[in-house]
Amino acid sequence: MSEQRNAIPREIVRFTSHELAQHWVLLITLTVLALTGLGLFAADTWLGRALIAAEGGIESRGILHRVFAVGLMLMVGWHFLYVVFTERGHRQLMEMRPHSRDFRDVGALLAFLAGRRGTLPEFGRYTPLQKLQYWGAGIGSLTMIFTGLVLWFHTASMMVMPKWVFDVTTIVHGYEGLLLFALLFGWHLYIVHLSPGNFPMQRTFLDGRITTRRLWSEHRAEYRREFGDVEPPAGPPRDGEKGGR
Amino acid sequence: MAPVSFLVHGLAVVQAQPPATAQMPLLRVVARALIGILIAVLLTYIVIEQVGSWRRRRSGRE
């Protein structure tokens, strides 16, 4: 048994360099889009004025916003090709599919987080919260791209849609941006880096690696698929790990 | 040419409708309420986890 245990590596690759590159591009484009968008959204406040000044004025803010919007569109296209036409990418997409079990697992997860349950449910490769973040960011990005294009090409879009649709699009683009900002820079950042067991930083987004001990505690079903029922070897903790979501 | 009664009636209907921008405050209120609810849910999540973490630390010490 201990020989089997020693044969299990202490760390494995969870995300390839290709997937990390996609994450970096998304991180950079969404950060710049959020900052340049927030400047305009809150233009009549001190924060908006400070952001616009830092972005070189109202005109360069607009140029920056459009350049990075094109970056986001290319990124979405790249990701679409990756999940549709590569074997690994397609497998990741299939793992991200929501199941009815996810809804039950959320209750058990909340009980664990509240300290009313000793162990996490046996999650697969992605937990329900990770799926929620993926689909939230994905659908949010697509909405932002569509509404952003309507606003960018306003003359052409007003030729095919009534004025009220344009007005609604303006509001949806602004508030959806704020929603995405709160979801990614508030909740996602907290869950991945600031929550107990991860603080001050989880390094998986830098090197794509995860310890088998963390895999065992947080993605038990995936661990069992890879290594069976043998527990992982003990090793030095990484990223302040004690278990998380 | 449209009959006069239609033109008068049509004009009255158009004038009775508020301009599109006048309906926007309601949409803004709904959008702000949704964002407020989302932020409240996220904060509740964080509080639940922090309380759970504190409980575990306390039971670990005992």
Image: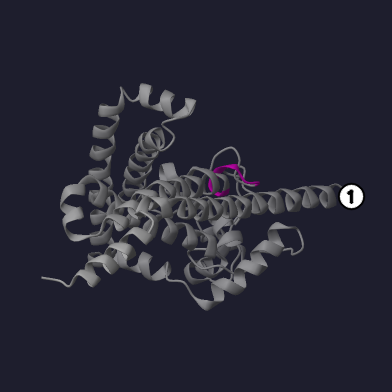
Question: Would residue B13 appear left or right of B5 to someone viewing this image?
Answer: right
- The residue lying toward the viewer, choosing from A36 and B23, is B23
| Residue at 67 percent of width and 68 percent of height | A108
Q: Quick one: A194 or A201, which is closer to the camera?
A: A194
Residue under label 1, please give it: B62
Please state which of residues A212 and A182 is positioned toward the viewer in this rendering. Answer: A182
Q: Position of residue A147 (x, y in %)?
A: 30, 53
The overriding secondary structure of the stretch rendered in magenta is helix
Q: Is residue A136 visible?
A: yes
Q: Residue furthest bottom?
A: A100
The image quadrant where one finds the N terminus of chain A is bottom right
| Residue A221 placement, left or right of A22 | right
Position above or below: A186 against A14:
above
- Residue A69, percent across and down? 27, 44
Residue A16 visible in rendering? no
Query: In the picture, residue A66 is in which quadrant?
Result: top left
- Report x, y in % for residue B60: 82, 50
Q: Residue at x 56, y 53 (%)?
A: B33
Chain letter belonging to callout 1: B
Task: Name the kind of residue labelled 1 in the image.
Answer: Glu
Q: Let me know if residue A194 is in the magenta part.
A: yes
Left or right: A186 as drawn, with respect to A78: right
Please give left or right for residue B43 compared with residue A206 in the image: right
